[in-house]
Image (cartoon, rainbow, N blue to C red):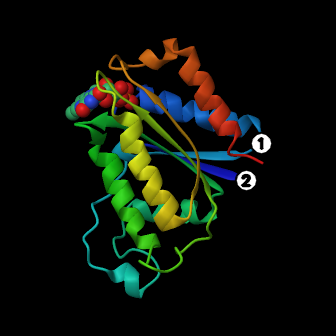
Amino acid sequence: MKVVGIVGSPRKGGNTEILVGKVLEGASDKGAEIKTFKLNELNIRGCQACDYCKQHDGCRQQDDMQEIYRELISADALVVGSPIYISDVNAQTKIFLDRLYAFLIIGKEPKFPRGKKCVLVYSQGMGDDGRKVMEGVADFLKNALGMDIKAIVGGNYLNPLGAVKEREDLLKTAYEAGKSLVG
Ligand SMILES: Cc1cc2nc3c(=O)[nH]c(=O)nc-3n(C[C@H](O)[C@H](O)[C@H](O)COP(=O)(O)O)c2cc1C
């Protein structure tokens, strides 16, 4: 059982990173192997809409997304965490999501088996639209890639770095969501 975590926030020790870490901890405590990618530290370009992936297996762009593709194909579950920037996922996360286009052919089966489990994580400040944003991402992952969305975990009033460490409720929800990915 392998779980891949994606951290979209550029902030080291930020709330997204902590919450994604808690989800992975829950999965790891149930025996999963875990692997984390911090998007801001990787070289990943936006989708070029060349449609190479519609005629071939995979994406033409030989950047750090290639390793994430390999890990996602072999993973049993995925955790994607993003801070909310201007009422949406942030740019790093959006680029990652756009690049998942390489896995889908509209109207056909995705290029990996259906039923991979998924937990979505968000962190935001004064707004309260994070859940709605992540519900949109969940719809895409479910409808286009056949993923089984287990939970959306997140909260607001989380501007200070690491503020979520004081939010026992959220940490617990994240940990339990991670456990739900295994078995
Ligand atoms: C460029 C930028 C845009 C933001 N836009 C929003 C927003 O639209 N709504 C909101 O509630 N918080 C917004 N925030 C606050 C972040 O979502 C919040 O600080 C979040 O907890 C950061 O997550 P992190 O700790 O994982 O980096 C914004 C922050 C930045 C830097």
Residue 65 in the image: state x and y as whole percent: 41, 61
164 sits to left or right of 158: right
Residue identified by numbered label 2: 1
Please determine whether, in this image, residue 21 is positioned above or below residue 78.
above
* Image quadrant in which you'd find residue 41: top left
Residue identified by numbered label 1: 31
2 sits to left or right of 93: right
* Image quadrant in which you'd find residue 56: bottom left
166 sits to left or right of 46: right
Residue 74 in the image: state x and y as whole percent: 63, 63
Whether disc 1's CB lies below 8 Å from ligand 1 is answered no
SS for callout 2: loop
Of all residues, the one furthest to the left in this rendering is 86
Residue 79 in the image: state x and y as whole percent: 54, 45
SS for callout 1: loop
Of all residues, the one furthest to the bottom in this rendering is 55
Please determine whether, in this image, residue 70 is positioned above or below residue 77.
below
Q: Nearer the viewer, residue 18 or 150?
A: 150
Q: Residue at x 34, y 43 (%)?
A: 40
Q: CA distance from mark 2 to mark 1?
A: 8 Å
Please determine whether, in this image, residue 136 is positioned above or below residue 64.
above
**Mark 2 belongs to which amino acid?**
Met
**Mark 1 belongs to which amino acid?**
Gly
In this orientation, does residue 8 appear? no
In this orientation, does residue 23 appear? yes
User: Which corner quadrant of the figure contains ligand 1?
Assistant: top left
42 sits to left or right of 47: right
Which of pointers 2 and 1 lies earlier in the amino acid sequence?
A: 2
